[in-house]
Image (cartoon, coloured by chain):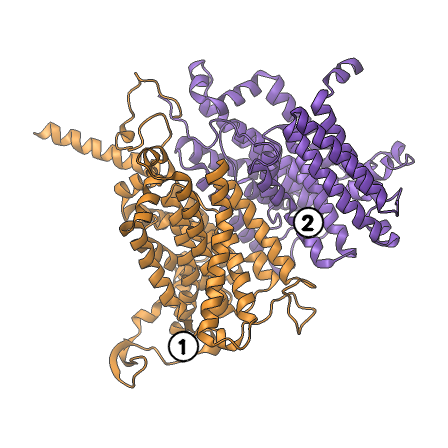
Amino acid sequence: MSEQGPLEPVPEERKEDPKGGDHAPSLAVRLALAQKAGGLVVPLLTTILAFLIGGLVVLVTTGKNPLTTYKAIFEGAGFNWFFEIGRHELRIPFTDAHVPFPWETNDFESIAALNLQQTLIIWVPLVFTGLAVAFAFRCGMFNIGGQGQYLVGAIMGVWVGSSLPGLPGFVHIVAAILAGAVAGFVWAGIAGLLKALVGAHEVISTIMLNWVALWVGVFLFGLGGPLQNDTQPFVPVSNDVLEESKLKVFWGDPLLQGLHVGFFVALAALVVYWITLNRTTLGYEVRAVGFSPEAARYGGISVARNYFLAMAISGMFAGLAGAIDVVGWQFRVNTNDVLTSTIGFTGIAVALLGRNTAIGVGLSALLFAALITGTSTRNLDPEIFRPELASNLTVMIQGLVVLFVGADVLILSLLGLRRRRRRRAEAATE
Amino acid sequence: MTGRLLERLPRGARGVAWLGVLVGLLAFWVALPPLKVREPIVPILIGVVALGLGTLAVVRGARRLGWGAITIGALGIGLGYLATLSSVAHLDQVVVWSALLAAMLRYATPLAFAAMGGIFSERSGVVNIGLEGMMLSGAFFGILGADKLNSWPLGLLCAMLAGGTLALIHAFFAIHLRADQIVSGFAINFLSLGITGYLFIDIYGGEGTPPNVPKIPNVRLDFLQDWYFVGPMLGQLNLMIWLAFFTIVATWVILFKTPVGLRIRAVGEHPRAADTVGISVYKTRYAAVVTSGVLSALGGAYLSIGFVNSFNQNMTVGRGFIALAAVIFGNWRPWGAAAAALLFGFSSALAQRLPAYSESAAVLFQALPYVLTLIAVAGVIGRSIPPAAVGRPYKKQ
């Protein structure tokens, strides 16, 4: 599609292409097209298809009923909490007032509530890493480095959070989270800068930065590393975040990993993302560059500046995820976490399935958070399905979702075909 | 023959720059075994000569190579100085050249296989960041086949089939459905991680792979055994390492000396033009991508049944991405990528031996390939220029 002579007809689906010219449409353009065409339908179809294939794998390899397995995962994620309707009361924060509420919130006997808290704890970083990928996408870039940005965020968060004793609690929390955000900003900013200045492809540079961050993390927290635990010289783990710089738990027991207030920060981030993209000059320029760098440049927008800013802001989202995870519920980072965490990579699936919209990211983050929590050893009933198997099933489903979502052209052409047929049928009846 | 080789030697400013590079390396080398010069002034003086040669080359116009020589000269001074400070016992323990180079070959082999695969795919215009996943599936299905069919050649065959199948999926989505190639390659990595992990747990459970799986044999070259240095380095290498050498040569011959290679490169540079003269863009790309999957899987199989003789979930830990880095670092050329694979293999071999100095700092060597590649794409040491049509789906008209 790279070269087209003047006499060649413009292909059907490219008539809407605002970029025109001799270039293959950018990812952003195609995603926007797909969004127009598919809306909610495409992601839903994708998910169903991925789950069907996953179910088939379960059936073929273990002979177990996939529906029972999925139900166990569903309950492991705590979604059955919504069905446990009763007559309960909710305390309004900062007051003694109580209002009626259909669901049980403060009863530790509800396993569903505990599981749901777990799911939402994972939801928080997935929203951030999903937004990170989505923001860069809107600028026409593929930030595959969410994992590295998440790691540097976690590293800076745990460093600031575990040092500087004596700082007031609130200031300390804000400092730790900001440190993570800045780290993510800088880490992704390197890739943005390389793209803006010398045109280095952001996919390559962010992949490389991922692995640099990973090994730097292993170095820092490994035995003898500069940030390794002061009191346990033979454990490759960081110092613990100080007690006063941990985020407050607002639902559930702090000792049982209740849901921390980072949940509201993630909700706010979704709103900020939407406002930034749709109601600010920055967002307008970012989207303009995403649609067509040439047109944006012609319109007086600095493409290089927006590449850098979009990438750095995208990294800031991922860095926030790392810092909030650390001060919210992990409180320490060990080298094994650094080596095995895939939150940043899952963020790519979240953004792709969520079609880079705020609502979409929120919903698909919930889906993947439920899958991750529902298949964890702690939450899935091993009688029904082995959690070790199920967690790999989760990875497989993620892969399938990404694969199918990526094939937007297939879905587009299918939809286009149907529309064309309908038009022809209408023309025939008239 | 020698005359032709001599003619191809770099001359003028480039020759000076290459000389500077060699002298820079020498500055470091004199401080290591077997010479072990203990006077810091010696590596410093040699390094200064390298700096001078580099500067001369820059002035004479060979800027890229010249700056390379200056960098290596500076590194030679620094590292050589550090080596003179460290104890002789440590040096002898860490720097056993024959063992170090043999380890380099072992670590470089999986990278070289996957990198050659990457070159085929990218030269045909299809980005393949699924190398990692294809390698991982090769590692798993290689050991699975070798175990169940009780034969390592059949294991290799299973690995190639698995890698080829994954590559076929990537090719179908990237070429026919014109999905974004990065998205679909990324999906391949996820899929492979999930499938291999799932089957590994399902088949081998908690115990892991059995210890008596048939493994790829080593090639014993008895006549080499007594040779100084070469004997311990090349006398006991795994069959796959020799196969990797062969693959590199074959990749170069196929890509640059045969009509097939010309077609592959044409499709990657200018698919429309290739199509016009009757080359099937789709078929060529399919073939190239499947080849990349088969080669990456061979690299993975070497890891599981040639190198460590077991399998673990996600055992490739980024080697596929290092191979990708080697492709870019080597400027999409077989020899360049092979040299990069050797360099990255050397840094892994060093990382394995350096803990004698510092446990934690040795880990940083693992990051070296990625940092070097970042510097390469940043254009500091010459720009890496990808094939013109890489990453762009082609639509037949």
Q: Is residue B248 among what the camera can see?
A: no
Shade of chain A as shown in the rendered figure: orange
Mark 2 lies on a secondary structure that is helix
Amino acid type of the residue that numbered disc 2 sits on in the rendered structure: Phe
Q: In which quarter of the image is residue A410?
A: top left
Residue at numbered disc 2: B365
Shade of chain B as shown in the rendered figure: purple
Residue at numbered disc 1: A252
Residue B60: x and y in percent read: 67, 24
Up/down of A122 relative to B163, above or below: below
Q: Is residue A297 among what the camera can see?
A: yes
The residue closer to the viewer here, B94 or A14, is B94
Evaluate if marks 1 and 2 touch, with contact meaning CB atoms under 8 Å apart: no
Up/down of B86 relative to A262, above or below: above
- Residue in the image at 85% along x and 42% along y: B42
Q: Quadrant of the N terminus of chain B?
A: top right
